[in-house]
Amino acid sequence: MTQYRSDFLHIAQARGFIHQGTDLTALDQLMHKECVPAYLGFDATATSLHVGSLVGIMWLRLLQKTGHKPLVLMGGGTSKIGDPTFKDTARKLLNDEDIQQNIQGISQVFAKYLTFGVHQTDAVMLNNADWLCQLNYMDFLRDYGTHFTINRMLTFDSVKLRLDRQSPLTFLEFNYMILQAYDFLHLNRQYNCQLQLGGSDQWGNIINGVELVRRLADKPAYGLTTPLITAANGAKMGKTSQGAVWLNADLLSPYDYWQFWRNTDDRDVARYLRLFTEIPLDEIARLEALQGAEINEAKKILADHATTLAHGLESLNAIHHTAFQLFQGQGENTDSLVKFILDAKDLPLAIDEILVKTQMAASKGEAKRLVEGRGVRLNDQVVEDSKALIAIEDFMEVEAFKLSVGKKKHLWLDIGES
């Protein structure tokens, strides 16, 4: 393992943030001797970011805490085009009103993780619409188009995969990587930005920007990516059977957020502690060594620290109060329970099917055994038959159903539109 002198790279490597980078030896020397402005971009594709973006936010936080300057770039301009992804279809095109609304929602989260202001290491929030939307297309093509070759662009994974699948890749999307490279050049000229951070799926775009800055600004420029964060079961970070794990409290309650981390797979706990908390590594090593039921201690610590960063200590106190009431059977405060939305067109469903769908049971066989053991309750009434049906008509009589398995597993069942 490389021994870095700069605090940022040393800690980032130890905690698992670094996947690949450009000229890391030179970047380490630079970050060891001076404050380095670095940027990370967030396209405005929803009104909130989810935990899949949290590794980048934590990386910016580490950047600032080790004496460097974070530039948080809102993609007000690039969101109009959409980044070519590894999916088979282009992103949905957004209008200006949608993009602005999304930026307002997304920007709320950063003040919880970063310090903004006018001092050397204070973070700055920017919107690339401020310069991209002012570009003259003919001048832009003439001045920058010659620095990108189709041959090179076709080798990038996001493009190559779409072409290999014979999926359409529009010329509009093809422009995205050029505009992102221009972002880096603009930020280098205006803010002396020398480093772009991003996920591993952005490697090709980052390389384009690094090379454009080196050619046209005649200055060193660097790129770093994080690994793709997936759960041990292979699922993409930030997605669950109930939907995205949003960072904004108006889309996901702090209690549900805490529960997401509390329910982390045993195999992921140590890695998530390194990435999503600031607990010292020696303490994480102690927690990593816990076995059996003791691993729940580490999960609670992970949930507490991650939730405190996102929603504050006051929210954590309320969460602990709710959790105590629910898990210890001491009260009826269920306002913050996770809500699972059943699709109305799938109803009626048997209890055993619902238990599997909500992941309260691993199989119908387990669901049957839980019911036979009188371990399943619906609105606090013991369920006697695993094949009992819940139909749409049942939801006309109650607003939602509280589904409980044992003393520690509870959620609300509701229905969405058919």
Image: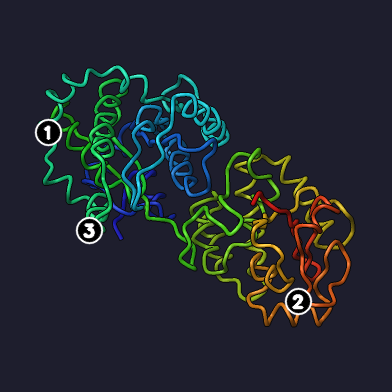
Relative to 370, is 119 on the left or the right? Answer: left
Disc 3 residue type (three-letter): Asp
Q: Considering the numbered disc 3 on the image, is that residue within a helix, a strand or a loop?
A: helix
Q: Which residue is mark 2?
A: 387
Q: How many numbered marks, from 0 up?
A: 3
- Upstream in sequence: badge 2 or badge 1: 1
Quick check: 205 left or right of 145?
right
Residue 186 place in picture, x, y as percent: 27, 24
How packed is label 2: few (under 14 Cα within 10 Å), some, or many (20 or more)? some
User: Which is closer to the viewer, label 3 or label 2?
Assistant: 2
x 72%, y 65%: residue: 348
Instruction: From the top left corner, tell me how far across and down residue 340 is, in percent.
Output: 68, 56
Q: Are circles 1 and 3 on residues that touch, CB within 8 Å?
A: no
State the residue in front, 243 or 418. 418
Marked residue nearer the N-terminal end (1 or 3): 1
| Residue identified by numbered label 1 | 147
Q: Secondary structure at mark 2?
A: loop
